[in-house]
Structures are given as C-alpha cells and as structure tokens.
Amino acid sequence: MPFISVCSLALVPSTVSRLQPWGMITLLDPASMIDTPEGLSPDTHLKLGLNDVVHVQEGLVPPAVAHVHAILDHVAAWDQSAPLLVHCWAGVSRSTASAFMAACALNPDVDPVRIAWHIREASPTATPNRLLVRYADEILGRDGAMIAAVDAIGRGEDCWEGVAFDLPARWEL
C-alpha cells in the first residue's frame, strides 16, 4: 500500500536509504535548502523555500498559495509505486501540514478529522502549519473542515525534533 513518510531533515539520509522513495518534498527556509539526496531524481524532488510561520514577518518567507499548489501538483504527479517522503527542519509543522493536505487531496471523500487523528496518534509532536492547511482547505474546497480537523487534534508536544511517521495514501470509507 502506498504511503507518505514524514520526518525531520536529520532523518532524510537514513529514510531515503531505507524507503527508496519515489520522490520527496523539502520544506525549508530558503537559506537552508538541500541538494537532492543520492538515489532520488531531481525531477521528483520538490524544493520549497519557506519559513515555518503563520503570519507575515519581516525577513521571513511565509507559506503561500503557490506553495500549496506546488505541493498538490507534486502529489498528483506521484505514481505511488514507492513512498513519498516529506520533510521540513524538525518534522513537526510544515511537513505534517503537507502530508495532511496530500492525504486529504488523495481522499476527497474521507473526513479530514479521521486523517488528522491518525497523524496525532502516529506522532504526538505533529503540529500542522495552520496557514498551509488553511490555503489547502480553500483550494480543495473543504469549507473549513481541514482547519477544524487540525484544531481538533491541537498542538503537539514540544520538541526539538518531531516523531517521524507514515500516513496511508489511500483510505477506505
């Protein structure tokens, strides 16, 4: 069964080696962007330079609608022959939001609350970035259901590095 794997930057090398993913989504501040890891095609590595903020702050790049479109387009291109790896710096906020929006996009008939609670159970540290989720909610026409789902699971535990987890790509009704 295809899945989305979420981890921190520190775990990318070992996760790429272990999973041999189809591709990867990197969400890092622009100054910390990484090269495509060995074993991955640059064509399947989406690199997005944005900061983990939910409000515009001088000197930082907030999540934008264009970032969400890029993520959703990358997920739509994923052939699901191997896992999709998503990471940010800590594996807590930008990556969990991206995995959540990917699962919601791939499963339009599944209640986002169900997906969000799976994330919470798999990773007590997950705190999906609300701005990314809000934009995805609007783009996917979920009428606030995705934001409500993130609110339902609340903020994750404080940490320096999030608990890595896997999220199914396909959900049964």
Image (cartoon, rainbow, N blue to C red):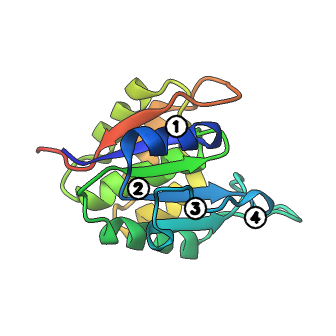
Q: Which residue is mark 3?
A: 36
Marks 4 and 3, the one that precedes in the sequence: 4
Q: Are marks 4 and 3 in contact (CB under 8 Å)?
A: no
Q: Please report the residue visible at 65 percent of the width from the left and 62 percent of the height from the top.
A: 35
Instruction: Point out the frontmost of discs 4 and 3.
Output: 3
Q: Which residue is mark 1?
A: 14
Q: Answer yes or no: is residue 43 visible.
A: yes
Which label sits on residue 72?
none
Image quarter in which the N terminus is found: top left
Q: Which residue is mark 2?
A: 101
Residue 143 spot, x, y in % from top left: 37, 61
Marks 2 and 1, the one that precedes in the sequence: 1
Mark 2 nearby-residue class (10 Å; few <14, some 14–19, many ≥20): many
Marks 1 and 3, the one that precedes in the sequence: 1
Residue 114 spot, x, y in % from top left: 28, 38
Q: In 3D space, how far apart are the residues under numbered discs 2 and 1 (Cα atoms)?
A: 25 Å
Judging depth in this view, the residue of 158 and 135 nearest the camera is: 158
Which residue in the rendered view is the most extreme toward the front? 38
Residue 112 spot, x, y in % from top left: 32, 47
Q: Please report the residue visible at 56 percent of the width from the left and 56 percent of the height from the top.
A: 37
The residue type indicated by label 1 comes to Ser
Instruction: Point out the frontmost of discs 3 and 2.
Output: 3
The residue type indicated by label 2 comes to Met
